[in-house]
Amino acid sequence: MFLADVMDYREAARRRLPRFLFDYIDGGAFAETTLRDNIDRLQAVRLRQRVLTGADSVSLEANLLGRKMAMPVALGPVGMAGLNARRGEVQAAAAAEAAGVPFCLSTVGACTLEEVAAGVSTSPWFQLYVIRDRGFMREMIARALAVGCDTLFLTVDMPAPGPRYRDKRSGLSGGSGLARRISRLTQAAARPAWAWDVGLLGGPHTIGHVASALGAAAGIDDYWAWMARNFDASVTWDDAEEIRALWPGRMVIKGVLDVEDAREAARRGFDGLVVSNHGGRQLDGTLASIDALGPIARAVGDQMTVLMDGGVRSGLDVLRALACGADGVLLGRAWVYGLGAGGQRGVAEVLALIEAEMRVAMTLLGVERIDQVGPNLLVPRGAAAEET
Ligand SMILES: Cc1cc2nc3c(=O)[nH]c(=O)nc-3n(C[C@H](O)[C@H](O)[C@H](O)COP(=O)(O)O)c2cc1C
């Protein structure tokens, strides 16, 4: 199969991964309405084609959260991503570093901060969940600092995990019975390339940082039970500020959709936020990220860095998000499809594709620098209708 766009990497990942892993990446919560909306609403953003602008020396360079990057794109935190290829987060971080963009490791990655940091020379960003076990959280913060991490993403849209029915159907979650274990083994056996690369050679098969908290009982079912015990719905803005006090670097609130919440994050002095609905994996039927972005960027964009994620599947989508007010974009599934399809090479190819698509789109938009991309590039609402 020749791979042209990110959705081809999705298909290649589907063919290579056991069903329970592909469905875990690909799926969303409840009826997956928001997952679909994220993509559809983003692709509905209409940009102004300009001609004869002489835009032939395009630069994608950007500076976000104190870091110079090749383009305003980073690999967002994805739990268990490392199971998609052997020691997957290490491979993804290496691809990100080579492409000149940051990699953000999830609290629940398969690889630890130390393992990822040892594989690259630029420290990863780190994403923290608010966990009932505050000792675990403090330990995570200390470990992130020890490997030189300068930016912490506090994910706040998961006070409780959203119900993901594909995971129940595939046998990834929903109980610890023998039938589910046999089903997962059967699914793995049906994907020999993955079974060899990850199943046989890719151990330990643990959720990196959580392994020490789980002790001897470190299987996937134990992990779900730990998640259910530890996600903390009692968390407030004051708790977020307490975490801020422990973190000397930059801190970004991830998972904001409401303007009032964005204003609160700005009032409390956080450095940035990510407009996000967790890729449609939490509250189904809420706003698509792109629809939440504009009002938030207008409200707080002059006080903090505004990132966005959800539904980004091309370099053109990145520009759509920037035109709607984002300073930068996190990739979620897009990079994990690359990892599942072809490990480090797959992630590198996805990033090269996004970069190439951004370059072409900027030429067609008639702009040469990222700071020229903003609402000025949006087709005014109603314009298409007026002219027909
Ligand atoms: C399989 C999967 C696991 C995820 N795990 C995490 C996580 O551990 N922490 C987090 O903050 N966000 C997590 N996210 C959300 C992503 O960071 C991001 O918000 C989302 O994937 C963006 O949507 P997109 O995949 O449509 O681009 C996860 C997303 C996926 C698809």
Image: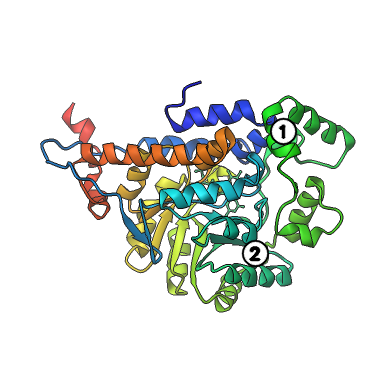
Callout 2 secondary element: loop
Coordinates of residue 247 in the picture (x, y in percent):
55, 75
Which residue type carries mark 2? Val
Considering depth in this image, is 249 or 200 the residue closer to the camera?
200
Which residue type carries mark 1? Trp
For residue 277, say whether it is visible. Answer: no
Q: Measured along the vertical axis of the image, is residue 134 above or below residue 278?
A: below
Q: Measured along the vertical axis of the image, is residue 285 above or below residue 152?
A: above
Looking at the image, the residue that sits furthest to the right is: 178
Q: Nearer the viewer, mark 2 or mark 1?
A: 1
Alpha carbon separation for disc pair 2 and 1: 35 Å
Considering depth in this image, is 145 or 292 the residue closer to the camera?
145
Q: Are marks 2 and 1 in contact (CB under 8 Å)?
A: no
Coordinates of residue 157 in the picture (x, y in percent):
58, 56
Q: Which residue is mark 1?
A: 196
| Residue 245 picture quarter | bottom right
- Relative placement, left or right, of 161 versus 46 is right
- Relative placement, left or right, of 236 versus 329 is right
Callout 1 secondary element: helix
* Residue drawn at point x = 22 percent, y = 52 percent: 372
| Residue 387 picture quarter | top left
Q: Quadrant of the C terminus?
A: top left
- Relative placement, left or right, of 108 versus 258 is right
Q: Report the number of discs.
A: 2
* Residue drawn at point x = 43 percent, y = 67 percent: 263
Q: Which residue is mark 2?
A: 130
Coordinates of residue 184 in the picture (x, y in percent):
78, 33
Q: Measured along the vertical axis of the image, is residue 113 above or below residue 293?
A: below
* Residue drawn at point x = 83 percent, y = 36 percent: 181
